Every structure is written in C-alpha cells, then in structure tokens.
Image: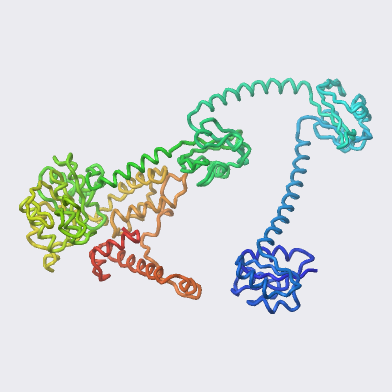
Amino acid sequence: MQSFLIVGGGKGGKAILETVSSVDFVRVVGVVDLLPDAPAILVARQRGIPTGRDVRPFFEPPPDVILEVTGRSEVFEHLSRIKPEQSLLISGSVVNLMVRLIEEKERWYQEWQKRQRELEAIIHSTHDGMIAVNRQGRITLFNRAAERMVGIKVAEALGRPVTEVIPNSRLEHVLRKGTYELNKKQTLHEGLEIVTNRVPVKDEDGKVIGAVAVFRDVSELKQLSRQVMDLESMKSLLQAIIDSSDDAISVVDANGTGILINPAYTRLTGLKPEEVIGKPADTDIVEGESMHMRVLKTRQPVRGVHLKVGPHRREVVVNVAPIIVDEELKGSVGIIHDVSELKQLSRDLERARRIIRTLEAKYTFDDIIGNSEAMRASLEQARQAAKTRATVLLRGESGTGKELFAHAIHNASDRKYNQFVRVNCAALSETLLESELFGYEEGAFTGARRGGKKGLFEEASGGTIFLDEIGELSPGTQAKLLRVLQEKEVVRVGGTKSIPVDVRVIAATNVPLEKAIQEKRFREDLYYRLNVLPIHIAPLRMRKEDLRDLSMHLIKKFNQEYGRNVEDIDPEAVRALHEHDWPGNVRELENVLGRAMINMGYSEKVMHLRHLPPLNARPAPATTGTKDEAAWTDRPLKEVLAEAELRHIEQTYLACGRNKTEAAKRLGISIRSLYYKLEKYGLL
C-alpha cells in the first residue's frame, strides 16, 4: 500500500482527497493547510485522517508520495528542498490530470454500457424482423418483430438450428457461400409474404462466422412506401417554405438536439448546418440562456428574449414555441430576429440625444401623467404660462417632475422651434457656472478658449433657458442673474460689453426660497423677478390617485428597455404602492417598478405584490463578527472608507426624503459636493 501526503486544503485538495481515498492501494497519511477550516482539512477530520499546518511532522516515516495541490510554485519549490529523498513529489496539476483520466475512463465505460442497452432496445423495438445465426447455424438473435411474423416465441427460438424454426430459410446457404442475398421475396407460414436481406458476418480475416437476416411484411412495405412518398413531398414543401423565409429558423428535438435550420439562420449567425444540426441547442449561443431548453422544460412559449449568437456575437431577439403533437412534446421551434443594427442605431441616436440634450426639449404636456385634482391644477397653470413670455418658477420636491414641466412649457410656447437649454445650478462650481451661463472673453482666466466662448444665455437667445436648483446659486451669481432678468443683457466674464439676449427663463427649486431669504442666502429682489408665475407641483404622496396611471406608463417604458411584455399591475400591488409615502416621489416609483420588473419572469405579464421590493427598506447597519472582521482586514483602506461613505450618505439622503439641500446640511458638505458624491455612487 502506498502512503500519500496531501499539501493544500482548498477545493482541489478536497477533490483529490476524495478520489485517492476511494483507491484500495492508497493510504492518506495526512492533509496540510494553513487554514484550519479549509475544505480538505474538514473532510480529513471527518474521516479520521491526521491534519496540520506544517508538513515536517508528516515526514516520519517518509510518505511514498507527496501531492502538492496549492497551485503555488513557491510551495512546490519549498517542498522540493525539504522533502525526504525517498518521497516522490507530484504537483497538483499532474494529479488532477490522472484523476480526470480515471474519471474519463469510467465515463466512457458507463457510456458503452448505455449504448449496449440502447442497441438492445432498438433491436427489439424495430418493426423489421431480425434473425442472426452463428457459425453452426444456431439462432443467436431473434427479435420481437421476428417473433410476431414467424409465430415462435423468442425463448423457444434462441439456440435452435434456424432450419427447425424456418424450414425454408436460406441463412445456411449464406453461411456456406458467404454471399449476399438482397431484396429477396420469401413466404412464411400461412402464406405470409416477406422481403428479406441476408448477409454474412465475417471476422477480421474475412472468414464467415455467422449470418443475419432482416425482413419485413410486403403489405406493410407497400403502405410504408406510399407514406414515405407523401412525407417526402410534404417535407420538400415545408423545406421550401422554411428556406424562403427571411427570418432565421432553428428547430430542435425533444432532447434539445438541433435538427433543422434555414439559410437565413446561417446568414445571421455565421454557423453552417453541420455546426448546428446534431449538436446541443445552446451551441450557437455566446451570451444568454438557451430558450429552446427553457421551452422544452416548461412546455411554455417565450417571446422577445435578447441573446448574442454565433462567432460574430450578433445581437438577436428570439421567439421560441414548443412543438406538441397529440399532447406529446416533440421539440421546439425558434424564430430569430437580428437587432444588432437596430441596437447600433439606437445607441447612435441616444448618443446624439445626450450631445444635444441641452439644446432640445423632449417632453410635452402629453408626457405628464396624472388626473388628480392637484396635477390638473398644475397642468392648467403650466398651459397658461406657455402662452406668455413671463418668467416661471417651478416649485416642488425632488423627483416630482419639474423638468418635464419646463420641457412641456417650452414646447407649448411660441419659442418651441428655438433652442432649449437646461442648466443644473447645483452641479457646477460657482466659477464654472458663471463662465457657462454668461460666457467669457479671451484671456479671462487661465485656460480660457482663444476668441472667448458664448454663454448659455447667448446660446438660448430666442428660446428658453431652464435653471434647475435655482436656490443653490451663490450670491455673486444671483446678482448677475438679476441683471439678465432686469436688463435683458449679459456681460461675459472678463468683458465689459453688454450683449442683449432674448431668453425666456424657467427656474425650478425644491428649496423654500422664503426661508432662504430670511437666512440671507437668497436675494429678495431676485425672488420677486423669478416668482412671476409660480407653479407648485404636488408630491406623489399628495396625489396617490395617479399611482396606477403612472405605474402603467413606467411599465410600458420598461417593457421597451428590458424587452418584456408586462401588460398590467395587480390591484394588490397597487394597494401596496398606495400605502407608501414616496419620499423620493416619481423618481422613487420608477426605481421600485424597475426593480420589480427585473424580479419578474420573462413570460409573466402581470406585476404582482411579490415582485415589488420592500418599500420601507433602509440600508442595514454593518454587522460584526469574526468573518466580517477577517473580510475587512483583507481590503484596502481606500475601499473600506469609500464603502462607509456610501452607506452613510445613502442613509442620510433617504432619511431626508431625498431632499439634497437638507441632506447636504446634515452631512456638513456643500450641495455641489453632495451632487458629485451622489453621481459617483449612482444614487441620483
């Protein structure tokens, strides 16, 4: 018996331990690893095998073989230096190869046995009669079809001379002559006429060692011939129809093996028939799950699933349906649509939209969802405001849709064919905001563009400028903005010349400006210039009757984004939405419904309560314990600090109902710093 020492207690060590332990001539004398709870260490303890952190105690007496399975070259080199001379050191990669070869041999043996059983099943299930005889002319094979046609039981026929069972058999003649007799007619008992093929069986030297006869009832053969002709005709017709389709078609059998594709499939995926037919259903997929296998498992069709297929990773949308004949699943058929070009066009369009986002208004009043009394009042005010050129002040909590109102007012005004410029006053530093709003002259500051630069007020001349988060402007910028509103002109940074502008101003804020005036943070004269047409937009908690309409609008939007087909939301889920206060307003509702759709199955069409995430969830406090401490001690300080900062900012932001001004005050940072961190951590 050979003694083995295993060095390395990871998954590889565990696998090798379990393999060698099953071999009778191998005895494992120990398992060594630095971690006391390594997988192989735990298994060794269960089996009573010695374990340790150091290899030296296991060198007395010297083991026959040392298996190094850590995968680390320095460990292997160290063992090479200290091991006993008579011990054989083998790396884990070599051992893994040996184990795999043993497993492969066992797998092939089991596969051979399976094939033998399948062969017997095929022989006895075939409709053709089969009889085989050995060199002495005694029957060695007699299937059930032969039993039916000859009229003798299998057990009675096996081992008997073939001439006793079928007196006019010519198998003995085939044995003597070693010749073939093909498509020969023969009459059995009671006038049963058959067509038979008789062939000799020869060994490697060409010596006849037996003979086989395969035969069929002529009447059945004639009927089958007619059926084959009909089937061939139908197959040719169906093949012509499938081949003429511009949509790629893929068909698999009930086991998920490819049986048919059309030329459009080859053009789309780049895969030829020999690369798909006879292969598993997921052969063509490079990213995603095989919808054929899902349909075969569930017996339900799937629609609109996005995948990547073929060597060129083409983006496609697939529809797959089961093939059911007489309530028996025969396979599935998939229709594959190429969307890679549409995706690219969509990406190009989105990129263009991002580039010109500040130069166009995307939304109209039709895009604002809500039939509540509060929303109808706000919409009526906004429509009236669109007919004038007066300055509009949109007021409401974060996430209520102030920007949608600004877009809609511009698009309903006589300025809709001119530019629409959006500026987030809280997201830019004071210096950068001034240069962006009012422009600058050449040499105004280090890095200024040669020839200077137009400001956004100049860019928007003749159109509309939307100043979001107006309450976060610095006093200096407030004074310059007041001049623009009063004098209808701007002075560039570093310049002295007044430039006339014709701009309609729409401002928005979630800050109580009256309180800001009392605290000397906002100019009173600017307030009166902005507050010409104030429009208050109610928070979602004050107009919960709009929840269902908003939810259906957002679900349709997510259907397009996620490739889903959700048609409705369950009343129980709507009731749950009504019970929530929605501190984040419509933006929070959009987040909740997006997560709910991700939780839904691809074939589900109704959003239920079980799909919704917890509506009152808050970030859980950090847990403590040995495992957490071990995990933290292995992480860089920068990563730990960033995670702690994220957790604290998220908790504070949610506790303030997503009010950025209040959150910045509690955190003791500026509103611009808060914007930067919210964007950095994906919390906006």
Tell whether 327 sits left or right of 684.
Answer: right
Q: Is residue 29 above or below residue 285?
A: below
Can residue 629 be seen from the camera position used here?
Answer: yes
Task: Give the quarter of the image for residue 491.
Answer: bottom left
Q: Nearer the viewer, residue 268 or 136?
A: 268
Q: Please state, as top left, top right, bottom left or bottom right, where the N terminus lies in the image.
A: bottom right
Q: Nearer the viewer, residue 613 or 63?
A: 63
Q: Nearer the viewer, residue 140 or 454?
A: 454
Color theme of the render: rainbow
Residue occupying image coordinates x 78% and y 36%: 123
Task: Give the quarter of the image for residue 481.
Answer: bottom left
Q: Position of residue 410 (x, y in %)?
A: 17, 44
Can residue 455 be seen from the camera position used here?
Answer: no
Residue occupying image coordinates x 8% and y 62%: 524
Residue occupying image coordinates x 82% and y 35%: 143
Q: Position of residue 568 (x, y in %)?
A: 38, 45
Q: Is residue 252 above or below residue 492?
A: above
Task: Give the quarter of the image for residue 664.
Answer: bottom left
Number of on-image labels: 0
Q: Position of residue 572 (x, y in %)?
A: 38, 52
Q: Please state, as top left, top right, bottom left or bottom right, where the C terminus lies in the image.
A: bottom left
Tell whether 140 sits left or right of 542.
Answer: right
Tell whether 96 sits left or right of 606.
Answer: right
Q: Is residue 348 above or below residue 92?
A: above
Q: Position of residue 300 (x, y in %)?
A: 53, 41
Residue occupying image coordinates x 32% and y 45%: 351
Tell whether 29 sits left or right of 41.
Answer: right
